Structure formats: structure tokens, C-alpha cells
Amino acid sequence: MGVSVRSLVAESLDNPRISQYIRWGSGVQRSELARAAHRLVRARWKEHGLRRYGSLDTVLSRTQRVEAARIIGELEPTLCMLAEASAIVIQAIQSECRGQTDSRHVSMEAVSGRSTSAALHHVLARGRLPDRQEAKGLAEDILAAVRAIPETMSAAHFEAVFHELYEVQWRAEGALNLTAFPPSSLLLGRDVRPPLTRPPGAPAETDAYGTDRSVYSRYASYRPGDPASRPPFRSASSRCVQPVTRRQHRDVAAETVHNACLPYGLRQESHRAVLYASHHGLGLAEHPGQADAGVGNRRDLRRVCVELRVDTADDVTEMVRQLARDRTIGGRTPGHTTLIEAEHWAVDGCRPDQFAAHLDRITQVVIRRLWKALHGLELYVEERICSCSLEMTIKVSLQRAVPAALAQWDAPAMDAAEGPELAPEQDLDRLMDAQRLVDAQNATSDLLMRNSTVATQLLLLQPGWQDVYDELVTADRRRYLSSTEFARWCREVVPGAGLARGAGGPK
């Protein structure tokens, strides 16, 4: 694994003089200190006129690695002071909360980032820790800013207020939009109505939920920040020249309920076009020597900053395709056979060049993170996504989210049961079953490649598929997926599998 600025900063934060302040429950978040350290390193790097290292995850050359280690070593006293100053400010906030009569609860999550930011400004400006009076002033300013933010409804209150409205709006337009714009066709989620709220005790909702994310979770993700700060999901690239018009305070809760009934939960048609184009770019690779008509007339969106519209879809597709080719995913490139194992069959009869295995799962990760970014932009700003922000989102997804997901998929025990602990022999049996399933999926992929004339019918689970499949695997049933396993596999990774009228077979 190559050394990057991120990995060097993470190693520096393990220094006991720093780690003592970021232990569990202290209130000082490691991620906030890391973010501050990244800013300091970047500024110092620029002062020295060194060759830019690109992103925080760029693998550094030997010379860059030496320079980065030297800079971080020079910053160590500042980082130690910053960690302690952050702790002092948070202690002052806790003291202020105990002494005030305001009944509104202030979470550590709400103040941690502000505390580190305020501590950083103080340390850089004065070169020392804040004294008691200065810490008290910083705490008062932070609490005032946090309490000025409209309080988020509880899930129970949200359910009580919006249950009837959601039912009415879903019947009026949500159900029709779900039929016309099924999320599964873009690997965004299931073709079902998103729940208004998640039941108590349900797991926390993450990027992996996509459009299956509850309406309340979408609403609760909104955090109106400092107008002077950069809006979330916008690129920080120096070539980004798009204006920013922050959306004014409005009834975010009611707006989120309404938007959940729109196609893919997005109000901007251009954002839906970006989803289509990005999905197409991730799922369609050219054969060697094959070129798309009109490529020479397209703009390279990696060199310009433009607001993306419906008519820029072809340019988006090409940019995403190039980004996917350029990026190494978990040590493998997208053109490697571990990712493109055979052929992927689209619902509309098109024939892209990838089989729905690792590639569809990778596409799912990227597309769902992109959906989150588009949804977030619609919450915070009036403008549509620009090419810089799209490039940033795709790059981060390919560089960080996809490798993390691949590591989980590659782990044999990734679907371990959450029930009672298994005995060693039971655990070994489970691992062997998981490996057998992977081997059977690979063997079945190869079999379908050799029988392309029936592959479409089988992958989409069209009527009569089971008889065809049984005949295909009859020579060595133990080597391939069973009918039930094959049907489950197709429904998980092939958009539209089993949606054909009259599709039968194992459930």
C-alpha cells in the first residue's frame, strides 16, 4: 500500500501527546483534527513551492514522501497544541451548558467541528493555548451559532406531522414516478416506496441505502452551516468558477416529503440526467478498436468547469468512463477481468460489455454516493451540479468507497450471521460455503459467456428461464449455481431481473 498524505497524517495523530485528547467520549474528534492537519500540510506544501501531490490519497513519490514527513514533523507541536486547545474549548462548552437554563440539548457532534476550527484559528493567530476567558468566549460563540440552527424534528414527531401528507402525495404522484423511473434500473435501490421513518432500533442508514433511505433520514441529514463556509458536495477545485446561491431557510421537512415522491427523489431534471449518464459511463466499456460516434465533438469535462444540464449527458458519460478507466480500484483497474468478467445485459435490450458481477456492485456504490451528493446539493444550493463537483464525487467514490466495499465483498465472512457465536467447525463450514458460492458464480459466468444466445433470457429471468438453465447446467450441477441461487443472484445484481410479466422460477 503506497504512502499518502492522509496515511502520514493518520500516523502522526497516533502520537500519545495527541491521542490522549481524542479518546472515546472526549468530544474531540479525530476526523476534525485530521481535516485541520490536512489544511496545514497543504498550506505549508504550497509555501515551499513543492510539486503538488494531487489528492490526499495520491501515492507519494520517494521525494514527496520525504518532504511530507518533514512538514508533518515540523507541524507536530502545532498539532499537539491544537488537540489540547480543542479539548479546552469543548470543556468550556460543557461548562457553559451546565450553567445555562436553555433546555435544548446540544450534541458533541454539533460542536466538535466548530471547536476544532475555533481552536485552530486561535492557535495560528496567537501561538498559544486559549486562557479561561478566551475559551469561555469561544464557547459562547459556538453555542450561539449552534442554537441559531433550527432544531431537527424527532422521528416520532416527523411521523406524526407528515404521515397523512406523505400518503396523499405518494398516491398522487409518487407511485406513478416509481413505475416510470424505477430505482433498480440505475442500481439506486429497490422499486418500493421509501419508508417515512425507520422503525426504532433499526440500523443507522448509510450511503449504501441509496433511494431506500427513509424520508426522515433524508431530512435529518440537512445541517444549515455557516454562510461563509463552502457548501457540502461542492468541489474545492481552483478551476471551479460556478456561482453559489445558498438556499434560504424554508420548511425543509415538508420539502423533503414532497421530493421523496419525485423521480429518484430529485427535483432537478438535470440531476436525473447526470445519474443516467454516469450509470451509462460506468457500465459501458468499449471493445478494443471500437469508438463511439461523435467522441471527437465532445468536451473533456475534466478540463473545464461547466454547469451540467440535460444536453451535457454525452459529455458526462465519457468523463465518467475515462475516470473509471484511469483509476485503480483496490489494486485492480476497471479493465481487469476480476471486475469485468463477462457480459452485462441491460433491461432495454442493449448489450454493454460487462457481466453483472463485481462491476454492477461497483457501479452501485458509485451511483448511490452520487445520488447522495445530488440530493445534498438540492438541499443546500440553488445551482445544478457542475463538472468539477461531479468529477470530485466520482473520484472519491472510486478511490475510497469502492476499495472499502471490495474488501468487504472479498472477505468470506462478510455476511456472518448476527446471532449466537458459531463453534469453530461451524464457522469453517460457513467459510467453505461462501467460497463455494463465489466459485459457482464464476463458473456460471463463464458458462453464460459460452452460451450468449440464451444469456439474456436467463439473466433477466424471463418466462421459461428455469427449464433452459436446468438443461444448461445438467452436465455438472455441483459446479454451477442452483436454480434458487441463480435467481437470487440475478435479482441482486442484474437491473430488471424478474420484472418481466409472468417471470417465474424460484423466489
Image: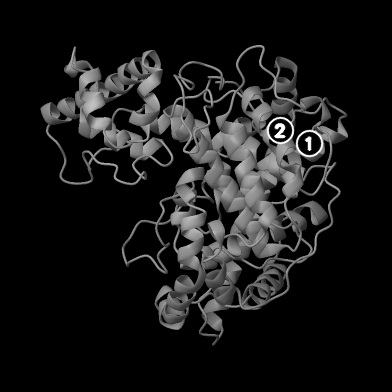
Q: Is residue 328 visible?
A: yes
Question: Which residue, as the protein is rendered here, is positioned at the far bottom?
Answer: 101
Q: Which residue is mark 2?
A: 319
The residue sitting at 25% across, 25% down in the picture is: 469
Q: Quote the CA–CA distance across marks 2 and 1.
A: 6 Å
Q: Is residue 234 above or below residue 435?
A: below
Q: As drawn, is 353 to the left or to the right of 236?
A: left
The N terminus - image quarter: top right
The picture quadrant where one finds residue 496 is: top left
Labelled pair 2, 1 in contact (Cβ < 8 Å): yes
Q: Which residue is mark 1?
A: 301
Q: As drawn, is 57 to the left or to the right of 243?
A: left
Disc 2, SS: helix
Question: Residue 434's spot in the image, x, y percent?
Answer: 25, 27
Q: As drawn, is 317 to the left or to the right of 359?
A: right
Q: Residue 418: which disc? A: none
N-term mark: 2 or 1: 1
Q: Is residue 27 above or below residue 50?
A: below
The residue sitting at 68% across, 63% down in the picture is: 380
Q: Nearer the viewer, residue 228 or 44?
A: 228
Answer few, some or many: residues within 10 Å of disc 1's Cα (few below 14, many 20 plus, some between 14 and 19). many
Disc 1, SS: loop
> Disc 2 residue type?
Met
Question: Residue 137's spot in the image, x, y percent?
Answer: 71, 73
